[in-house]
Structure formats: C-alpha cells, structure tokens
Amino acid sequence: MPDLLVRIKKKHDGAAALTAVRPDGSSTWQQQNGQIGRIFPLHDLTHYAVETSLGCRDGFFGLVAHGWDMGDFTSPWPKGRPPLEALVVELLVGYFDLERMTDTLTTAAEVNQRIETAIADGKFAPVSFRITDAQVDDIHRLRAELFARWKALPVGDTLELPFERRMGLLDTNAMAGA
C-alpha cells in the first residue's frame, strides 16, 4: 500500500468528500458541501499534482500520511504549526489555483518571483527552493490529467490516487540565513 490513499468522492448534490487512508487503516476525511464541494476537489487535486511532481514529504498529503488529520491544519493547530515545506507547498498550490481561476498559465520565473515576494513580505523564512520550467510543466501535465479524470468521473463514484512521501522539497541545510 502507498503511504496514503487519497479518495475524492463526487456526490449527487454537487458536494464532494475527501478521505485519506493510511497503511495502518487509520483515516481522516472532510465533507466538502455547497460551493466548497465544487472548488475544493480541484484544489486538492492541485495539491496532489504539486506534491507528487515536486516529490514533497511534508506538504498537505505528506503530513496526512504522517498522521495529521484534516482538522489539524487550522487554529488552534493541534499538531503545531505546519512545517516550512507545507507553507511553501500551500503558496505554490495557491499560484496554480490562481492559474485555474484566471485561465492563464504561469512560468517558473513568475512563481519564483512570487516566492521571493512572500519571503520579503515575511510570510515565511527564506528558502533555497526554486521551481524549474520542467517542474512547472510536470505540474501542468499531471493537473490537467487529474482534472480530466475528475470531470469524467460519474456522480457517486470515487477517484482514488496513491500518494508516496518522498525526500522533501526543501533542503533545510541550504536555506538562506540558516
């Protein structure tokens, strides 16, 4: 079994449900109702595309695989604040979500500039990570495939995706200012 089995169910009322099952059989889930049910599956699939393409260890799905529950990602932070890699991943996913909403594709240079701006604005500590054009292309390709699979999924069915935690997106020894 993979480190995590991600399941997104397309419900009859336009809602969705996200379930994550760990190898030990434990799971966490989140009901996504109303407008959130139409938006969040695409956001979750973008997370999957970013984290899989970049080989993330401690992004959203990596932390869920490591034992975090869906409710652990908001205040009062039962597991503590998310690690830096999770914050960078969320920033990246936000940029790719913005692409989806504006129907424009971004380049690695634009994403890297946004990372620099977020660091300058104090949103997170300096990081050595910079995305490449090849990585952006991989994310676009996988995300398009996942979106097509979701769109073609019959109502009532579930999209299942295996997720493997990898080495990690950030090299903490190479962070600027460390």
Image: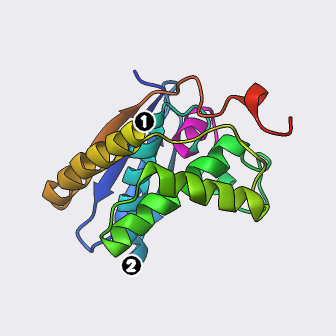
Q: Is 7 left, or right, of 91 in this rendering? A: left
User: What is the span of residues highlighted in magenta in the rendered image?
Assistant: 60-69
* Quadrant of the image containing the N terminus: top left
Residue 91 is situated, as x and y percent measured from the top left of the image, at 58, 57
Name the residue at the bottom extreme: 35
Residue 61 is situated, as x and y percent measured from the top left of the image, at 52, 41
The residue at the point 58 percent across, 23 percent down is 167
Residue 157 visible here: no
Magenta stretch secondary structure, dominant: helix
**Is the residue 3 above or below the residue 175 in the image?**
above
* Quadrant of the image containing the C terminus: top right
Q: Kindly report which numbered mark, 2 or 1, lies closer to the viewer in this rendering.
A: 1
Depth order, front residue of 47/150: 47
Tell me, for residue 52, which label it has, or none.
Answer: 1
Question: What amino acid is at disc 2?
Answer: Gln
Mark 1 element type: helix
Q: CA distance from mark 2 to mark 1?
A: 26 Å
- Magenta includes 142? no
Mark 2 element type: helix
Q: Is 38 left, or right, of 71 in this rendering? A: left
Which residue matches tag 2? 35
Tell me, for residue 91, which label it has, or none.
Answer: none
Residue 28 is situated, as x and y percent measured from the top left of the image, at 53, 46
Question: What amino acid is at disc 1?
Answer: Thr
User: Looking at the rendering, which quadrant does residue 75 occupy?
Assistant: bottom right
Residue 128 visible here: yes
The residue at the point 74 percent across, 29 percent down is 174
Circle nearer the N terminus (2, 1)? 2
